Image (spheres, rainbow, N blue to C red):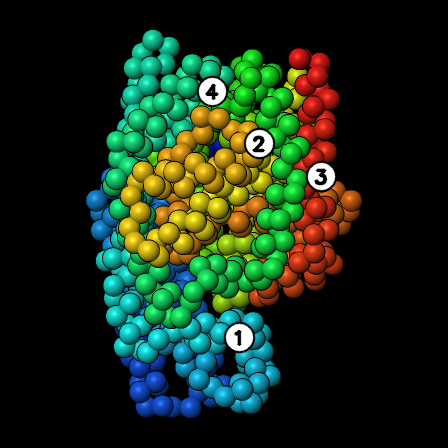
Amino acid sequence: MDNNKYRVKWDLERLYSGGSDSKQFRLLLEMVEIMIHKFEDEIKKMSLALITLDIANIKRMLDEATKIRANLSEASSFISCLLAINPKASNASALQGNLSKFVSRFESIMKRIHKMLADINDDRWGHLLTSKELMQFEFILKEWREQGKYYLSEKEEDIISDLMADGYHAWGSLYCSFINSLRVHIEIDGETKELSFGQAFNLRSHSDPRIRQASHAALEKEWNKNQDVFAKILNHTAGYRLQIYKKRGITNILDDPLRKNRMNEESLHRMWSVVEKFKQPFVTYLNIKAKLMGNKEMHSYDFWAPVLKTSKKIPYDKAVDFILEHLSQFGTELEDFARQAIHQDWVDSADTPNKSAAAFCARFPLSGESRICLNYGERITDVLTLAHELGHAFHNHALQKLNPLNTFYPLSIAETASIFFEMVILDAALEGAKSDEEKLFLLDERLKRSVMNFMNIHSRFLFEKRFYEERKEGFIPSIRLTQIMKEAIDEAYARAFHSASAYSWVWTPHFYITGSPFYNFQYTFGYLFSLSIYEEAKKHGLGYEKVYMNLLRDSGTMSIEDLVKRHLGKDITSEEFWEEGIKLCIRDVEDFNCLASKYL
């Protein structure tokens, strides 16, 4: 019997009953296949017949693309949820394979549309965008037209799309299946236990240093044993991507991710230059934390551990109550939404052996719902993870009433609401701290996030940039990948991090995402962006919810630079914007150091 106030298992049956054997879900896939086939024929006829794209034709294409994309997103989310609970589910894996083919075909159709839009002359294009029917889609249409300028001939793009399903995207699927199947053996309390990658990884915040170190050593051994397999997956994924870039005339590896993130390269470089400029305070924090833990230097396997020994556990029910209580200070919609997500069983928080290690939020656009997956282990970090994923779900909720075409925000904005929710909860915990020990503990948790965004994420960016430059010359063996990663870590952490896993190129899933390279700088941007939003929210309280909602709703229809300018009145190409956020984090370092001096 479940004695919890809140359920720890999500309800997928309400969406599609029967799991991977759901007849309802299979009907959805069949319908999507029919829709794609029909749409494909229509677009080919339009293209081959050289039919002039008028307002009515473009609007019809938009409507059909919207319906298909929503159905594909729904299907992808459901399969992701099935595989998260059981990565070895053969039926779900088969469904994923079929869906990949549908996605590939749809992408091929969309490329053809983008190319057709790019071929429209400028004068006529300007006239089309001023029409009442297309005006609300101006941003997305301009984006599609710009993308169309990079595409090859229809025949070449069709070949590329066909190869993606069983080639390119298959490597990403193989990575997920393989890493989730790995098991390590660790001695805990005198008993040897077999743990999944996710369970072993969670031990990095265990209060016992021997268990932390044992978990680190066991995982390193597993990465070492399988590194050549992972090297092949990473090399082949990157090699395919580079070949496509070469054919399209893209020489700068950052061009594609920046375009997809709707960000200028100047903004990205300005952010990293400011981060590099302010590394020292966080080096100081790492050194002081190491001393508090009785060490001369900060070991990577001690980083996530509590700065002071604590046995405090936060039951799931209390975590949920705490989140609901403190979201209410910024608006009724934030609290009401989170309450709805919990009570309608959108969250699966059970810590089970075969479950995916990665927490995530999946959007179901047809039902207007989301599903959240995490392994809740009664730590403050788990409370923050729950808040983080609820933030993602709230972002989905904010966009629900818009036309679906205007709801696809870039990865750079994807962390905005999630980090905001995290900050609300962590700040509330700090304000309610009843002792210096508790406050020091919580400041440490907040500073871990600063270090992750200013150092760890920076190391990922440096690794990926250097990896791609070398990959242009040929296959990179695992030993060299490990060396590149070590150099990136040393630079990003200013050599303040010892025993760091140079195999993090293996276990960082973001390197293997086939949707886009460089899924790293978005976290740092989102962190600093959310700091600015949160500071404004604290000033205005309940009155800021409307501004916040408008910002989230605009996230799918403008560039990053324009979004920040419109809603915050700030310029992200200036150092001042980035320094403002980092200096708030440096203030945390100062508070931490002051409290830590009492224990040294």
Sooner in the amino-acid sequence: mark 4 or mark 3 = 4
Q: Nearer the viewer, residue 139 or 542?
A: 139
How far is mark 1 from mark 3, CA to CA? 37 Å
How far is mark 1 from mark 4, CA to CA? 50 Å
Sooner in the amino-acid sequence: mark 1 or mark 4 = 1
Say which element carries label 4: loop
Residue 93 x/y as whole percent: 25, 48
> In the rendering, which numbered label is found on residue 142?
1
Instruction: Check disc 4 and report the residue beneath it.
Output: 206
Residue type for callout 3: Leu
**Residue 402 as seen in the image, left or right of residue 229:** right
> In the rendering, which numbered label is found on residue 584?
3
Q: Are marks 4 and 2 in contact (CB under 8 Å)?
A: no
> In the rendering, which numbered label is found on residue 448?
2
Residue 498 x/y as whole percent: 48, 26
Residue type for callout 4: His
Sooner in the amino-acid sequence: mark 1 or mark 2 = 1
Say which element carries label 2: helix
Residue reaching furthest front?
473
Residue 89 x/y as whole percent: 24, 42
